[in-house]
Amino acid sequence: MKTVAMARAERPILTPTQWAYLAGIFDGKGSVHLAPAHNKSGRLKTFQLCATVVCGTSETAIRKIAETVGSSRRLGKINGSGNKRQAWRLRLYSAQAQWFLEGVLPFLLMKGAQARLGINHHKAKPSYIGARCSAERAQAEAKSKAILTELNRRGAAA
């Protein structure tokens, strides 16, 4: 079983140039959102941080980005239908999403507000796994989710 300390030790060390490059991709093709959290007994009434680093049709490019951030297992395939082409998506969750957002934050031009909100959301979560949240925490999470939904809307001011 992997521990949090092991997961941190496995994160790649990126240069400022690499972070800036990833920030540019994330600004154009990424998003920050809160996904419903689950544990073995089902859905919790809380949300976990989720960062979609990139979504697009170039599997080779997205695999290279996944390799760079050390997360090729979070690469998902989206099947096309109708006039839509098949695409790939790289998502990071919880602590790994926080690590990514903190790395790209100094270089973001458009999604800084979303990144800061996501980082703050994750830092405020209880540190134990499977924690059910209090009524106050649930309200704060619902408010964060509503703000992120508005910020992620196309054409919304950053």
Image (cartoon, helix red, strand yellow):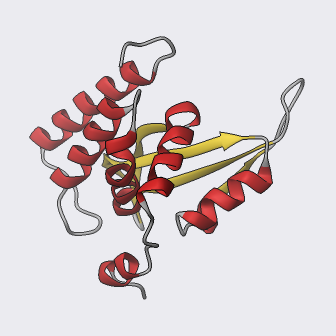
Give x and y (percent) for residue 85: 85, 34
Displayed quadrant of residue 60: bottom right
Q: Residue at x 47, y 54 (%)?
A: 17
Q: How many marks?
A: 0
Question: Would residue 99 appear left or right of 54 to someone viewing this image?
Answer: left
Give x and y (percent) for residue 87: 77, 42
Which is more toward the observer, 131 or 32?
32
Which is more toward the observer, 154 or 83?
154
Q: Examine the rendered structure and indicate whether residue 147 appears above or below residue 89.
A: above
Q: Examine the rendered structure and indicate whether residue 121 appears above or below residue 18.
A: above
Q: Residue at x 37, y 49 (%)?
A: 101
Question: Would residue 117 appear left or right of 110 to someone viewing this image?
Answer: left
The quadrant in which the C terminus is found is: top left
Q: Residue furthest left?
A: 136
Q: Residue at x 30, y 42 (%)?
A: 118
Displayed quadrant of residue 107: top left
Q: Residue furthest front?
A: 17
